[in-house]
Amino acid sequence: MLEWYRTQADYLDILADMQALVSGILWPHGVAAFRRITVREAYRKWAGWDPFAAWDADRFDFDMATKVEPNLPKTPVFLMDYPPAAASLSKMRGDVAERWELYVGGVELANAFTELTDAAEQRRRFELAREERRQYGEADYPLDEEFLAVLNQMPPTGGVALGVDRLAMLACEASDIAVVQVPA
């Protein structure tokens, strides 16, 4: 996994960076058309419901794996603008979280978002997550007070995590990720 951040950037800036990087590696002599599909559009079309209207984490995850991902185009596609509950570290824009995932050939390559830099909002989200864990009998953990103390000092930032092994698999036209993984 390769992860990086860029200050004075948002998820759309990181999207442009990722599009250029992936195009340069997978299609150095041509131009691939990258599509953008919103999460709301994808779920309405392939899962038959709107996760923004009625959030259900289990259903969201199940339908992502069984209905949405299998129906995404095999050409490069950014699945964009997630429900707030599916992007706890993302900045919000209206009712959507500024987050995207990139899929190529049905393989998820990257996950990116505009970093939330509002410490009060992040604390609220962390507390909600703690309460959910308690309700499910899961282990609790203390808040990262050092992180929260400096969060408001962070400039606007976009970040991404890229599955380098998956990108290598696509670049090698391999059908199995084990072909490109280095043995431990």
Image (tube, grey):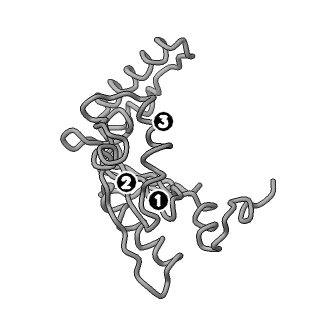
Residue 151: assigned label: none
Disc 3 to disc 1, C-alpha distance: 18 Å
**Please, which residue is most extreme toward the bottom here?**
29
Q: Quadrant of the N terminus?
A: bottom right
Q: How many marks?
A: 3
- Graded by Cα atoms within 10 Å as few (under 14), some (14 to 19) or many (20 or more), the crowding at tag 1 reads many
- Graded by Cα atoms within 10 Å as few (under 14), some (14 to 19) or many (20 or more), the crowding at tag 2 reads many
Badge 3 vs badge 1, beta-carbon distance below 8 Å: no
Residue 103: assigned label: 1
Q: Which residue is mark 2?
A: 79
Q: Amino acid at mark 2?
A: Leu
Whether residue 155 is visible here, answered yes or no, is: no
Q: Position of residue 11 (x, y in %)?
A: 33, 55
Which residue sits at x=28%, y=45%?
Answer: 40
Badge 2 vs badge 1, beta-carbon distance below 8 Å: yes
Q: Secondary structure at mark 1?
A: strand
Disc 2 to disc 3, C-alpha distance: 16 Å
Q: Which residue is mark 3?
A: 62
Q: Position of residue 118 (x, y in %)?
A: 29, 36
- Graded by Cα atoms within 10 Å as few (under 14), some (14 to 19) or many (20 or more), the crowding at tag 3 reads few
Whether residue 4 is visible here, answered yes or no, is: yes
Q: Earlier along the polypeptide chain: callout 3 or callout 1? A: 3
Which mark's residue is nearer the viewer, 3 or 1? 3
Disc 2 to disc 1, C-alpha distance: 8 Å
Q: Amino acid at mark 1?
A: Tyr
